[in-house]
Image (cartoon, coloured by chain):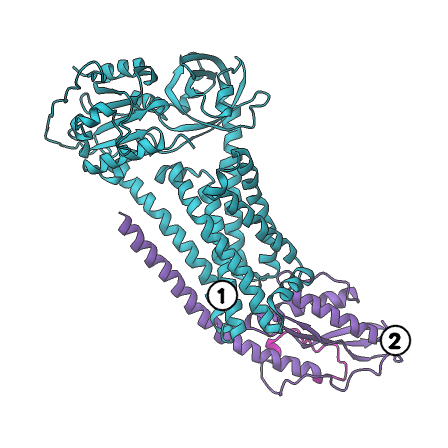
Chain colours: A cyan, B purple
């Protein structure tokens, strides 16, 4: 029997599932893809650090050290190095947010953005240090205090007023992105301020090439800097604008129907063209924009909850996402009209078969986080008996798409557990319902061979964190853990 | 795997910095030679009071030998202001202070035409400024000779030097009543 349903608490004591310690032998069919991904994941920090070193090397190669002989020269030199490193970090941040498939496929969208966020403060500090040190260094050389020097730079040196504006914009962008500040404002406000990043970068460029002697016309350093700036701009333009627009026109998606799954949860089915090229992306997410009044500007990140279904020739078919009315924007989606056009970006993320490293696979989902697992379960390769699905919800009603998942598990030979019931308020670290937790169950009781499996986790971030910790405790390697944040 | 990434990143960064540093030492050596050549050039430029317009002062290579002291102050050539309207002679521009050093140019005038522009002093605060000056001065000189005025574009990457150069030039033009 492939399907196993735990009795929910209240109907009796939960049964401890039987342990089946089986000898684990890998076929190695995912070994190559896994090695490749790890190499790419390692290449990213190496590239990042190298680019940072290169930005300093530009200055060294220009004989920068000889200029740092006097106190004023030393301060100015430090200011120049801070500016170079700061700009390099800004370019790295832009690349991390550019949704480049290489980065996405190596570490995933959320990890890339996490790293993007980590660079925010260091780059701002470097740029602030750049401005301060240059003002002090130049001031020392001319016998002026830093403030008068800054005023003189603003007034007298061409393009410098733009650089001052740029610094102010950078401060605004980073400050509004601090977690404490960001929480106080609606997403739209943060997003609008974040768009100013482009203005900040653009206004900073003129002074780098006109005032910065390092990049004077005729130097190879100027060419290097031009190339990395233009390449970053081109990557943003291509991956964030051209590709999405092309995908939108190619697939011609329109809303077909909206059906209720559970209170507050709907399936949105869309029909479109050439959907074959989107197949195999179960679990990955797309960014959807429903082109209706009041909705079109709001991007929604949703995973497909089922593989595309072919309905006609030439790749005509249907897509489906399953959505819970969480935020204000999502609530409006419950009332989408048939025929509404849909713009699409993606697929993004690493919550897919591309992340597999082992023959065995475990999928653990809670609430609306169950839906991407449903699509993953449909296509990710495994032999019968080598997959386990654990679904978590307060009640069986909250195990969205539970029927479909049960059916898929039957067809493909996966073990299924339903874990329903409230949490134990006394143990915030538990991912299990109170009854199971108090009965002393652990992850390995459900999946004895979990240490030799890929573990996909999708659900509210607190809960998902608990699951990941439980998996680590059960001996699952970090490389085998695949987690997708969906409540962001 | 993280260790592999950290080690590779450290090695790559160190290598890049080392290469940069090495070529920097090399550049610094050649630049001090260039700087010496430049001061020599300026000195010889200041010496040409005979207004021979062909003494291409822009090319540092031609007068690479450090032959003179290089104190290119206001040498005797400064025309006795105003009066010498459209005659010939050399006229010194103002000394303009910038954060990268001082700039002063001298013009040679023949029959109301600027026949030559010589940089008496150019920004030289750091090695880099010397390099910029040597790059920008010939461009500015040829543009000024073509435009026959100080109304020319600044050189990209050398705006401070260019502005000072053109300010000093304007003063020289005023002195020559051009």
**Residue A455, quarter of the rendered image:** top left
Segment tinted magenta in the rendering? B47-62
Find disc 2 in the rendering and name its residue. Answer: B86
- In the image, residue A488 lies in the stretch drawn in magenta: no
Q: Secondary structure at mark 2?
A: loop
Q: Position of residue A67 (x, y in %)?
A: 51, 72
Above or below, A327 against B40 in this view is above
Tell me what residue is drawn at x 13 percent, y 32 percent. Answer: A25
Tag of residue A78: 1
Compared to residue B119, the image places residue B152 above or below, namely above
Tell me the mark number nearer the camera, choosing from 1 and 2: 1
Res A402 → quadrant: top left
Q: Position of residue B95 (x, y in %)?
A: 72, 76
Task: Report if residue B29 is visible in the image.
Answer: yes
Dot 1: chain letter: A
Majority secondary structure of the magenta segment?
loop
């Amino acid at each position: 029997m492939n399907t196993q349903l735990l009795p929910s608490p209240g109907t009796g004591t939960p049964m401890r599932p039987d342990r089946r310690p089986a000898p684990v032998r890998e076929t190695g069919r995912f070994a190559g893809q896994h090695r490749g991904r790890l190499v790419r994941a390692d290449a990213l920090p190496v590239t990042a650090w190298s680019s940072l070193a290169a930005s300093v090397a530009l200055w060294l190669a220009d004989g920068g050290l000889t200029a740092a002989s006097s106190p004023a020269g030393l301060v100015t030199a430090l200011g120049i190095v801070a500016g170079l490193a700061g700009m390099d970090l800004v370019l790295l941040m832009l690349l991390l947010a550019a949704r480049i498939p290489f980065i996405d496929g190596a570490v995933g969208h959320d990890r890339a953005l996490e790293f993007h966020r980590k660079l925010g403060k260091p780059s701002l500090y470097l740029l602030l240090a750049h401005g301060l040190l240059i003002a002090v260094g130049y001031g020392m050389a001319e016998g002026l205090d830093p403030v008068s020097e800054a005023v003189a730079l603003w007034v007298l040196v061409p393009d410098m007023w733009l650089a001052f504006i740029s610094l102010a914009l950078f401060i605004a962008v980073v400050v509004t992105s601090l977690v404490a500040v960001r929480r106080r404002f609606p997403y739209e406000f943060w997003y609008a301020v974040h768009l100013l990043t482009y203005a900040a970068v653009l206004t900073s460029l003129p002074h780098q090439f006109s005032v910065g002697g390092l990049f004077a016309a005729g130097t190879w350093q100027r060419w290097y800097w031009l190339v990395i700036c233009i390449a970053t701009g081109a990557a943003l333009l291509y991956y964030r604008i051209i590709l999405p627009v092309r995908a939108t026109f190619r697939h011609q998606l329109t809303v077909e129907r909206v059906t209720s799954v559970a209170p507050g949860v709907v399936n949105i089915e869309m029909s479109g063209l050439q959907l074959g090229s989107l197949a195999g992306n179960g679990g990955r997410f797309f960014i959807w924009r429903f082109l209706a009044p009041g909705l079109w500007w709001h991007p929604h990140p949703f995973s497909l909850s089922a593989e595309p279904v072919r309905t006609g020739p030439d790749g005509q078919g249907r897509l489906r996402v399953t959505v819970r009315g969480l935020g204000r924007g999502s609530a409006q989606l419950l009332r989408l009209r048939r025929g509404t056009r849909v713009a699409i970006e993606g697929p993004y993320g690493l919550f897919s078969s591309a992340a597999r490293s082992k023959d065995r696979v475990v999928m653990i989902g809670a609430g609306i986080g169950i839906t991407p697992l449903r699509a993953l379960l449909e296509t990710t390769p495994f032999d019968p008996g080598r997959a386990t699905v654990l679904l978590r919800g307060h009640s069986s009603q909250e195990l969205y798409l539970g029927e479909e998942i049960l059916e898929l598990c039957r067809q493909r030979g996966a073990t299924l557990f339903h874990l329903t019931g409230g949490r134990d308020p006394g143990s915030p670290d538990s991912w299990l319902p109170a009854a199971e937790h108090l009965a002393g169950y652990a992850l390995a009781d459900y999946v004895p061979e979990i240490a030799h499996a890929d573990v996909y986790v999708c659900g509210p971030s607190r809960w998902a964190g608990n699951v990941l910790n439980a998996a680590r405790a059960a001996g699952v390697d970090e490389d085998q853990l695949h987690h997708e944040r969906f409540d962001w | 795997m993280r260790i592999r990434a950290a080690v590779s990143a450290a090695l790559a960064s160190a290598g890049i910095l080392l290469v940069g540093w090495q070529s920097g030492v090399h550049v610094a050596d050649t630049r001090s030679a260039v700087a010496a050549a430049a001061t020599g050039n300026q000195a010889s430029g200041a010496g040409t009071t005979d207004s021979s317009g062909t003494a291409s002062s822009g090319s540092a290579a031609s007068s690479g030998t450090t032959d003179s002291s290089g104190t290119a102050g206001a040498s005797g050539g400064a025309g006795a202001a105003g009066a010498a309207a459209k005659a010939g002679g050399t006229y010194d521009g103002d000394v303009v202070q910038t954060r990268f050093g001082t700039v002063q140019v001298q013009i040679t005038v023949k029959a109301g035409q600027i026949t030559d522009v010589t940089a008496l002093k150019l920004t030289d605060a750091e090695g880099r400024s010397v390099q910029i000056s040597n790059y920008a001065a010939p461009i500015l000189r040829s543009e000024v000779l073509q435009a026959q005025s100080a109304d020319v574009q600044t050189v990209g990457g050398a705006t401070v030097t260019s502005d000072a150069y053109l300010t000093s030039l304007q003063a020289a033009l005023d002195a020559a009543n051009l």
